[in-house]
Amino acid sequence: MSGAYYKGFDGLSDSEERRIVLVGKTGVGKSAAGNTILGREAFESELSPCSQTAECHKAKGSVDSRRVAVIDTPGLFDTNFTQEEVLRRIKMCISLSAPGPHAFLVVLQLGRFTQEEKDTIKMIQITFGEEAAGYTMVLFTHGDQLRKQTIEGYVAESPDLKALIRTCYNRYHVFNNEVKDPDQVSQLLDKIDKMAMANGGRYYTNEMFLKAEEAIQKEKVRLLKEMEEQRQKELSALRAKVGEGSTYRREERLVYKRYETRARKQAERSNDFIAAPAILLSATCGAAVGGIIGIAGGPIGIAVGVAAGAAVGAAVGALSVQISERCNVQ
Ligand code: GDP
Ligand code: MG
């Protein structure tokens, strides 16, 4: 049988959206990498500290005829923010990548590898769940610094880097964001597809992503109801212009799709999951939220946070009638 027969088996079809989340410290080149992936200036990428990304952003595109959604995050695990701020950012990141991402890209800048960077994958596991490592890949930026050296040679020189890469099953890739080279993007997407294949074509999800998705769907329905009058007006104008024939039916579908897309986009940024205070999330995802809260306090805070989160989760959970809904992220 030809190899082509197997292409896409247990993997992703071109029409399936690949949700890619970029995480890493501020200034390493996450936004620039997002722009390289999408082949356009979708995200603001600058050296100036004033223009740092303070919010999570999402942009979509078609790359190599594959549908891609990139979620660009501010330094989620930067330690100089309040717990409230860290939690707010993480909730937005979860909501924008719901029902779950196909890939977490840990963005590292070549030549810059500190303790905080060493902790990143652990942070991802604490925040998003242990199994998230199976969906994680390291993406090096500043590939232009390699000059004559290969990325394999560079990685081989650092035992710490090798150890970090090993925790995500030796998956890594390098970008030079200074050049518009579509090959580096195709190769990254091939590696992501290969990773998805190893995961049975599934994206990563857990109770938190599912809760976010539920809240998005609910908000989307509400928004579509709110927009209904406006949509009907648009359809009446269309009918007046083209009549009731096949053109109308085709256009009607497009109008509906446009409203759906707009409602989804809006709902992802504002919904009950995002609005929920930490204590409520703790009721279902105690340890995970505790971990997130702990992250704001740095590596020591994580351990404390996980313990506190589990305790808060247990306490609130005991009062809740939905104990069965407690998530198993530890
Ligand atoms: P973020 O905070 O992680 O989103 O980082 P940015 O995308 O804003 O990038 C920070 C700075 O690094 C910007 O000045 C980028 O132009 C620069 N940069 C990012 N990637 C590369 C790269 O591959 N090579 C070089 N030379 N500069 C890069
Ligand atoms: Mg940025």
Image (cartoon, rainbow, N blue to C red):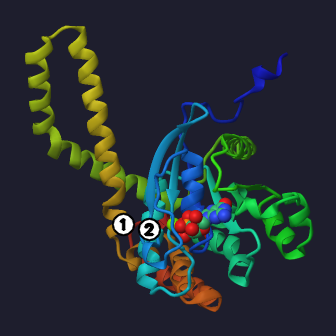
Q: Quadrant of ligand 1?
A: bottom right
Residue 274: which numbered mark, if any? Answer: 1
**Residue 317 in view in this figure:** no
Q: Position of residue 310 (x, y in %)?
A: 55, 81
Contact? badges 1 and 2 (CB < 8 Å)? yes
- Within-10-Å neighbours for mark 1: few <14, some 14–19, many 20+: many
Q: Secondary structure at mark 1?
A: helix
Q: Nearer the viewer, residue 187 or 297?
A: 187
Q: Is residue 16 left or right of residue 52?
A: right
Q: Quadrant of residue 322?
A: bottom left
Residue 278 in the image: above or below residue 31: below
Q: Secondary structure at mark 2?
A: helix
Q: Position of residue 118 (x, y in %)?
A: 74, 77
Amino acid type at circle 2 is Lys
Residue 91: which numbered mark, if any? Answer: 2
- Residue located at (74% from left, 56% from top): 174
Q: Is residue 181 left or right of residue 309?
A: right
- Residue located at (57% from left, 77% from top): 77
How far apart are the two marked residues, 1 and 2, measured between alpha carbons? 6 Å
**Residue 178 in view in this figure:** yes
Q: Is residue 98 left or right of residue 196?
A: left
Position of the C terminus by quadrant: bottom right
- Residue located at (49% from left, 64% from top): 324
Amino acid type at circle 1 is Ile
Q: Is mark 2 within 8 Å of ligand 2?
A: no
- Residue located at (56% from left, 80% from top): 78
Residue 262 in the image: above or below residue 175: above
Q: Earlier in the sequence, mark 1 or mark 2?
A: 2
Position of the N terminus by quadrant: top right
Q: Position of residue 194 (x, y in %)?
A: 74, 42
Q: Nearer the viewer, residue 218 or 284?
A: 218
Q: Is residue 177 left or right of residue 62?
A: right
